[in-house]
Image (spheres, rainbow, N blue to C red):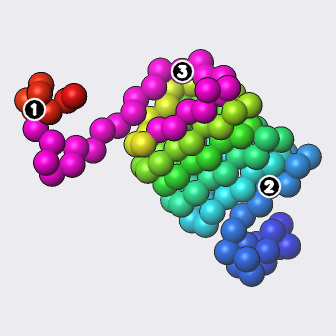
């Protein structure tokens, strides 16, 4: 555990390597790069990057999210979320903007949060 803490302090990131398994979730304030498996809730106030060998079985909350791996759980992202080709999501997704590549596998209710710009109006002619 001490080595992981010093690694976070030295590099300003948190890495879960391929083959590592974390039980009980995580709550970090630095970018989190996951190539292993996490069972439990995962929170990062900044970025969560889930590599193609990574899995999260639990709810995810992040400032930004990039997914190449697998998530089974609710996903809430304060900012941009990108679900890339080969990713698999099972659960609900809430993000703005939300970008889903055409070969990602999604089984979820999607809530793409809209932040209107100052010149947006409620007039139907402005929707086109």
Neighbours of disc 2 within 10 Å: few (<14), some (14-19), many (20+) = some
Assign a secondary structure to mark 2.
Answer: strand
Label 3 vs label 1, nearer the camera: 1
Q: In x, y percent, where is residue 9?
A: 71, 78
Neighbours of disc 3 within 10 Å: few (<14), some (14-19), many (20+) = some
Upstream in sequence: badge 3 or badge 2: 2
Q: In x, y percent, where is residue 29?
A: 57, 65
Label 2 vs label 1, nearer the camera: 1
Q: Quadrant of residue 112?
A: top left
- Name the side, left or right, on which 32 lies relative to 95: right
Query: Can you say whether 87 is above or below 61 in the image?
Result: above
What residue do we see at 43% from left, 50% from top?
79
Residue for badge 1: 122
Cα distance between the residues tagged 3 and 2: 25 Å
Query: Can you say whether 89 is above or below 29 in the image?
Result: above
> For residue 112: magenta?
yes
- Name the side, left or right, on which 44 lies relative to 96: right
Q: Return the mark for residue 16.
A: 2
Quadrant occupied by the C terminus: top left
Q: Nearer the viewer, residue 48 or 105?
A: 105
What residue span does the magenta drawing correspond to?
98-121
Label 3 vs label 2, nearer the camera: 3
What residue do we see at 51% from left, 38% from top?
99
* Outermost right residue: 19
Q: Quadrant of residue 31?
A: bottom right
Query: Can you say whether 77 is above or below 1 in the image?
Result: above
């Amino acid at each position: 555990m001490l080595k992981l803490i010093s690694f976070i302090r030295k590099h300003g990131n948190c890495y879960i390597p391929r083959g590592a398994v974390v039980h009980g979730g995580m709550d970090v304030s630095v970018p989190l790069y996951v190539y292993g498996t996490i069972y439990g809730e995962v929170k990062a106030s900044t970025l969560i990057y889930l590599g193609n060998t990574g899995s999260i079985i639990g709810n995810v909350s992040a400032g930004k999210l990039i997914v190449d791996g697998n998530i089974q759980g609710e996903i809430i992202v304060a900012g941009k979320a990108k679900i890339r080709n080969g990713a698999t999501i099972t659960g609900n997704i809430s993000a703005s903007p939300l970008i889903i590549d055409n070969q990602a596998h999604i089984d979820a209710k999607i809530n793409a949060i809209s932040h209107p710009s100052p010149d947006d109006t409620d007039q139907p002619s402005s929707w086109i």
